[in-house]
Amino acid sequence: MGIHVLSNLSGGKMSEQVPLFLAPMAGVTDVAYRLLARESGADFTSTEFTAASGLSRQDAKSWAKVETHPRESPFIPQIFGGIEDEMVETARLLSKKADVIDLNFGCPAPKVTKSCAGAAMMGEPDKLVSMVERCIEASSSPVSVKMRLGTGKDAITVLDIAERCAQIGVLRICVHGRTLAQKYRGVADWDLIRQVVEKTEPYNVPVIANGDITDAKSASKCLEITGASGLMIGRGAIGNPCIFGQIKTELGWGDFEAPWGAMNEAGQKHWAWNRYVELVDEIGGPYAARNMKQHAISFTKGLPGSRELRPHLHAIKDFRLIGEPLNLAFESFSSRRHNSLAVPEAIAMAEGLKNHEFKR
Ligand SMILES: Cc1cc2nc3c(=O)[nH]c(=O)nc-3n(C[C@H](O)[C@H](O)[C@H](O)COP(=O)(O)O)c2cc1C
């Protein structure tokens, strides 16, 4: 089997380049953030999961979630649902505009699993495989799947399900190395992902490893253990879309040129925040900016002074005003005029803007 690890000249281990995926994340991976991730080194992005029940009934809000942009190619909307006919109809409808359709069998949220959708489907292998098979038939674009290990530690179904999905012709299988019962707790099981890679190898279907990749070191380790054909990053990319470029640069992959130049961590986050705001502006429309406040807060995480600054940003009612004090804080900090993000002028500005309304 192809393990993507080579030895470098000094005898150390060096990972062979594989594609990097931004994980679909509800409330995070809006169009602007996906474009930002692409510019920052991600090779693939997909929409957050969207309910087949809404899409198949032509609900406008659901369709707004599966918007894309000409620069996002391939375009991969992700759908979920427990009712086979709705999933099949949605796959048919969406395939007219999508390059790939991704089916979600990983969401652990009770509001999803109670209707036997998301990760609950891992407990219903026959139902899941039948759903995938019919979606493949109905869709004019290829279909990929994203799944967990099973519903619990005594119900690991991923090996059987992944093999059957490979047999019926899915394009790609992404495995998050946790069970439904674990939600986001514990450690992702990369050994089990490796077993999935081995099991599906005869079918030549790429397996993408997901769970707990947070930097170049963990990316390289995950590849070494799993032998996967690609890596998917979720939480590690929240507030740090530059992670994709950081991994490529640190592992010496390809000729990725960082658009943020030679900046330090704060400088990179400042670049990314400004670029995100530009992209939101470029995309426009009622939904483009919907996650702006959460992103602003996330960009500060891990930097000194963020705990002090954050409540002041939170207090700003009109999220479109958050950019100004955040910029001021980033500027003072990344240019080393101040040793933390808790810049008094930025805090004063945030306080002053608390009850204001954004005006163009
Ligand atoms: C805020 C949030 C939202 C998520 N939304 C989705 C989703 O819409 N679809 C999906 O397949 N997984 C979703 N996930 C799971 C991630 O795609 C990923 O599988 C998981 O976070 C493990 O990867 P990580 O350890 O790199 O974060 C979500 C995760 C988070 C933290």
Image (cartoon, rainbow, N blue to C red):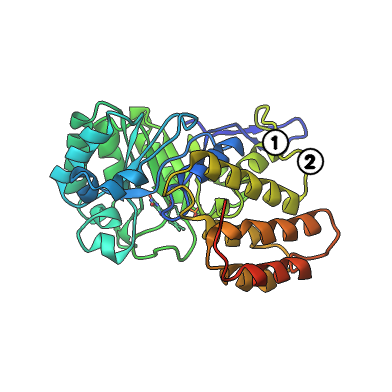
In this view, the residue in front, 184 or 88, is 88
Q: Are marks 1 and 2 in contact (CB under 8 Å)?
A: yes
In the rendered image, the vertical position of residue 317 relative to residue 267, given as above or below: below
Asked which secondary structure carries label 1, the reply is: loop
Horizontal side of residue 271 vs 27, given as left or right:
right
Kindly identify which numbered label has been placed on residue 278: none
Decide if ligand 1 comes within 8 Å of the CB at mark 2. Answer: no
Extreme residue in the front direction: 359
* Three-letter amino acid code of the residue under disc 1: Ala
Distance from the alpha carbon under mark 1 to that under mark 2 = 8 Å
Please name the residue that numbered disc 2 is placed on.
Answer: 262
In this view, the residue in front, 322 or 43, is 322
Residue located at (34% from left, 56% from top): 107
* Three-letter amino acid code of the residue under disc 2: Ala
Q: Residues within 10 Å of mark 2 (few under 14, many from 20)?
A: few
Asked which secondary structure carries label 2, the reply is: loop
In this view, the residue in front, 3 or 84, is 84
Residue located at (70% from left, 40% from top): 250
Horizontal side of residue 149 vs 112, given as left or right:
right
Horizontal side of residue 134 vs 245, given as left or right:
left
Q: Residues within 10 Å of mark 1 (few under 14, many from 20)?
A: some
Q: Ligand 1 quadrant? A: bottom left
Q: Quadrant of the rendered structure where residue 257 is?
A: top right
Percent position (x, y) of residue 193?
43, 46
Residue located at (26% from left, 32% from top): 167
Percent position (x, y) of residue 8?
71, 32
Percent position (x, y) of residue 261?
76, 38
Q: Can the viewer see residue 267? A: yes
Percent position (x, y) of residue 207?
42, 37
Please name the residue that numbered disc 1 is placed on.
Answer: 258
Q: Quadrant of the rendered structure where residue 109 is?
A: bottom left
Residue located at (57% from left, 66% from top): 356
